[in-house]
Image (spheres, helix red, strand yellow):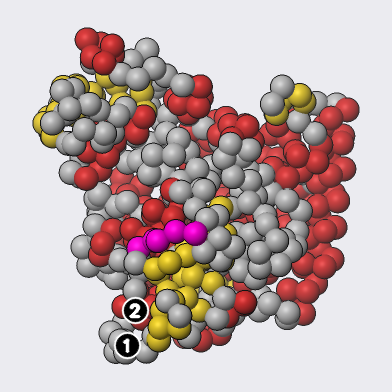
Amino acid sequence: MTEQKVTEDSVLVDDRPVVDFDHNAAEHSADPVASYRKLRAEGPIVWTEAWGGYWVLTGYEAVFDAARDDEMFSSARSPHGGEGQAILIPKRPITEHYPIDLDPPASLPYRKIMNQLLTPKRVEEMRPMVERYTTLFIDEVIEKGEADFATLTGIPSIITISWLGLPIEDWRRYSFAHRKVLSAPVGSPDYIKVTEEELPALTEDVRRVIAERKRTPGDDPISFILGHEIDGRPITEEETLNMVDLIISGGVGTVASLSGQALEWLSANPDVRQRLIDNPDLMQNAVEEFLRYFSPTQALARTVGKDADFHGVRIRKGDRALLAWSSGNRDAAGGFEDPDEVDIERMPNRHMSFGVGSHRCAGSHLGRLMARTILTQVLERMPDYRVDHEKVVRYPRQGVNTGFDQLPTTFTPGKRLLDERL
Amino acid sequence: MPKVTYTSADGDVSVLEGNAGDSVMEIAVRNGVPGIVADCGGSLACSTCHVYVREDDLGLLPPLEEMEDDMLDGTTSERRANSRLSCQLTLSAEDNLHVETPESQV
């Protein structure tokens, strides 16, 4: 990648360093890495007038400190910046998500349940299911010798839906809706369809399943959640929905983003691919580096909770702020030597791709397992795969999640491994 | 200055000094001790700064609170009676603590 020329084009308005920036804009999505590099050169925290105005936190330390301070940078819904979920700019008017739409201490009882649901031990128990679905997906294409690797986005979707005990035949709907809401341009037909029709319809389906589990509990995560108490009283069905909806939106698009980008990169870097084929033990550390380098969830928002001096600027209560994990992950201040290089043996690697602080991703163990399984199985079964790099199509909007709409790939055909079909 | 001795599962030893008020996790991260990941930065949200504290030193430590207790049920390596999350182990000037880092944090 060519080094961008950095210009000192921020201006001080009142006491704010103002930049021309919009993480939802096509110009940003064309090259998010260069866009954030330019912004970092302006400062660790800068202000843009887009979307009613927001701070953009670009430096490793600024992002880290903000995410660790729930009082100064709140995740909770508030009237500032419109209606809806506060972790996105613009806000998205959807079902509340717990615990992310709450601050500590209100978030903690929900977080506790989420933690118990996704411990390393429980995730390890899911391994056979994760491996089976991954094998089934590869079985679907292995005999053809060509595939669109963007369809691998279905793997985390079907795993999440199956694990939760939701109607398995609907996995394509979940996959489509949760990808489009974050990747289709705001206001585009796909965006409007999924936000106004499909996501609300799926939420109603989840609501029905929760009511069923309430009547007839089983051995599944929804029943597990329903069996808990919040502050001494039983958790409600609505609160359960708030948690399940968050699990789905957290698990479906992110792993797809990570594995798709890693596979594309490995196609372009066959020497590293060969090292991973020869030394599968390197995969665990490699996935950490892919997490840092690609930062599947690029940035999430907070609302400033009190007036304060923060990393050289004056922030005010009610200001909106975008915490760019992806930018911090490319900042040498994070202890990353040659941050724009992929080093699959990088250690230590204190990336912020799962966020930082009290809302750090609770599903990271599962996310890592899914990503490792997908990459490992592709390398085992399609070791010579080649992405047609000229024909890849990235998401039109990459402000929240980066990834591919199309990832055409060819490989030497192989045999199916399982008798069942998807 | 507080002093912490970190012993890895392989037996590598690092002896490090910090400042009063630092946590065992912060000193490790600042000095790049590989056995401590501390993904969440000390917010009791990840269980990746798990350590086994030397039995003789357990009395030096702040008591185990409920949230840390819960998070210790989610460590990758097995929880033992002397398991703690190092982000919660804040040190005083005179402390001299010995911890063992587990085989794996993630």
What residue is rendered at 57% in x and 80% in y? A50
CB-based contact (under 8 Å), mark 2 and mark 1: yes
> How many circles with numbers are drawn on the protein?
2
**Circle 1 chain:** A
Pick the front one: A126 or A302: A302
Q: Amino acid at mark 2?
A: Glu
Specify whether residue B73 is painted magenta.
no
Residue that mark 2 sits on = A42
Specify the quadrant of the image occupied by residue A301: bottom right
Does B47 sit above or below residue A192? Answer: above
Q: Is residue A383 left or right of residue A296?
A: left
Does A301 sit above or below residue B72? Answer: below
User: What is the crowding at mark 1: few (fewer than 14 residues within 10 Å), some, or many (at least 20)?
Assistant: few
Res A10 seen here: yes
What residue is rendered at 56% in x and 66% in y? A320
Spatial CA span between label 2 and label 1: 7 Å
Q: Position of residue A364 (x, y in %)?
A: 49, 45
Residue that mark 1 sits on = A8
**Circle 2 chain:** A
Magenta stretch mostly in which secondary structure?
A: strand
Circle 2: element type = helix
Magenta span of residues: A307-311
User: What is the crowding at mark 2: few (fewer than 14 residues within 10 Å), some, or many (at least 20)?
Assistant: many
Q: Position of residue B48 (x, y in %)?
A: 38, 36
Q: Position of residue A412 (x, y in %)?
A: 46, 67
In the picture, the quarter occupied by the N terminus of chain A is bottom left
Does A10 sit above or below residue A377? Answer: below
Q: Position of residue A303 (x, y in %)?
A: 57, 59
What residue is rendered at 77% in x and 67% in y? A195
Circle 1: element type = loop
What residue is rendered at 32% in x and 41% in y? B37
Pick the front one: B20 or A251: B20
